[in-house]
Amino acid sequence: MFAVEVYAAVRRFVFIEGNSRREAARVFGLSRETVLKMCRFSLPPGYTRTLPVVKPKLGALLPVIDAILASDQTAPVKQRHTAKRIFERLRDEHGFSGGYTVVKDYVRIGRARGRETFVPLAHPPGHAQVDFGEAIGIIGGVRQKMHVFYMDLPHSDAPFMKSYPGDDGILPRRSRERVRVLRQGTAVDSLR
């Protein structure tokens, strides 16, 4: 495998300086097929496997493992097979002579195959995420407990935060009215 710098030098020699690929092969000491590949791809192409990995011992038992995993999807959680139990069943019932790691790796991939790996988030305009909490703050040089209101508008990444002093654990009357309006769904209008 050649470095990116060699690729760049060969491509510069051929495309910018106008030399032939045969001349580039002679100057850089490469085969003409290699120079042709370097001219075709701007970056070195990674290795791509042409055939799937051959599993001589496990290959015939892959449908059995898939059937076990499919039946586990409807079974209660406590009754599902572990990779170790699947390995033991293959060894005892089907005469499998391979190792545990091969079975474990295939079971891990097989379980992940049917599972969604992410949850797409959608933040329409006007939707807000709100949180309340308590914090310790210094107001007028006095350390005291404060009630904190935090709102975030994820669509525009606009945050809003306000703190209210209070040592009795109850929000002041003015902020309670705003909280009531927030719960009705017009948070953005009431805070401006």
Image: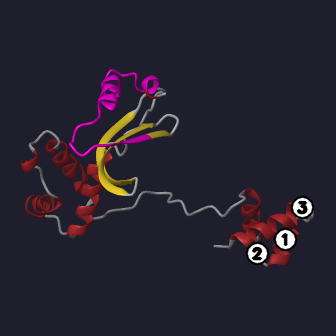
Q: Earlier in the sequence, mark 1 or mark 2?
A: 1
Q: Amino acid at mark 1?
A: Ala
Q: Nearer the viewer, residue 190 or 114?
A: 190
Q: Is residue 68 visible?
A: yes
In the picture, the disc for residue 16 is 3
Q: Amino acid at mark 3?
A: Ile
Magenta span has 177? yes
Rounded to the nearest angstrom, the CA distance separating label 3 from label 2 is: 19 Å
Q: Earlier in the sequence, mark 1 or mark 3?
A: 3
Rounded to the nearest angstrom, the CA distance separating label 1 from label 2 is: 8 Å
Residue located at (31% from left, 51% from top): 135
Q: Please give the range of residues in magenta.
A: 161-190
Q: Find disc 2 in the rendering and name its residue.
A: 30
| Contact (Cβ within 8 Å) of mark 1 with mark 2 | yes
Residue located at (35% from left, 46% from top): 117
Q: Earlier in the sequence, mark 3 or mark 2?
A: 3
Instruction: Determine whether the residue tagged by mark 1 lies in a helix, strand or loop.
Output: helix
Taking the image as shown, residue 30 lies to the left or right of residue 113, namely: right
Task: Write down the quadrant of residue 150 in the picture.
Answer: top left
Tell me if mark 1 has few (under 14), some (14-19) or many (20+) residues whose alpha carbon lies within 10 angstroms of its own.
many
Q: Is residue 98 visible?
A: no
Tell me if mark 2 has few (under 14), some (14-19) or many (20+) residues whose alpha carbon lies within 10 angstroms of its own.
few
Q: What is the x, y in percent for residue 182?
A: 35, 26
Rounded to the nearest angstrom, the CA distance separating label 1 from label 3 is: 12 Å
Q: Nearer the viewer, residue 150 or 43?
A: 150
Q: Nearer the viewer, residue 60 or 45?
A: 45
